[in-house]
Image (cartoon, rainbow, N blue to C red):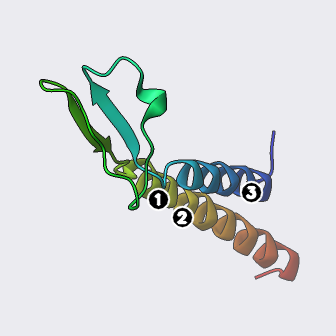
Amino acid sequence: MHSDFERLDYLISQMDRAFFVNLDPTPVFKGILNASQVRKGSDNAIQIPQGADASYLEASFAGAEAGKEHILTILSSSLKVNREQFKIKLGI
């Protein structure tokens, strides 16, 4: 079983990775067969054939909020356990 600190380290690491890889919006193309030729960025205009569509799909980061709540739950639980162990050692 992992310690609370190992769980926190892993959770924060996974959240950081997910946040980093999803910062850049994902282009979505409909009716374009060779989207690899489309260049992104503010210096590039996107020309698409008639009837095609191009848009961006952006992450909502709803999972980040759930992850933050989970981190707070783990921290709270760990602090309660440590506080109780400290009281036992002091005979309080």
Residue 25 picture location, percent across and down: 40, 49
* Label 3 vs label 2, nearer the camera: 3
Q: Secondary structure at mark 2?
A: helix
Amino acid type of the residue that numbered disc 1 sits on in the rendered structure: Glu
Q: Is residue 26 left or right of residue 19?
A: left
Report crowding for label 2: few under 14, some 14 to 19, many 20 or more residues within 10 A (C-alpha).
few
**Image height check: is 3 above or below 31?**
below
* Label 1 vs label 3, nearer the camera: 3
According to the picture, the residue beneath numbered tag 3 turns out to be 9
Q: Are marks 2 and 1 in contact (CB under 8 Å)?
A: yes
**Mark pair 1, 3: CA separation:** 15 Å
Residue 41 picture location, percent across and down: 43, 56
Q: Secondary structure at mark 3?
A: helix
**In front of the other: 49 or 63:** 49
**Image height check: is 45 above or below 47?**
below
Mark carried by residue 72: 2
Amino acid type of the residue that numbered disc 2 sits on in the rendered structure: Leu
- Quadrant of the image for the N terminus? top right
Residue at image coords 13%, 26% = 50
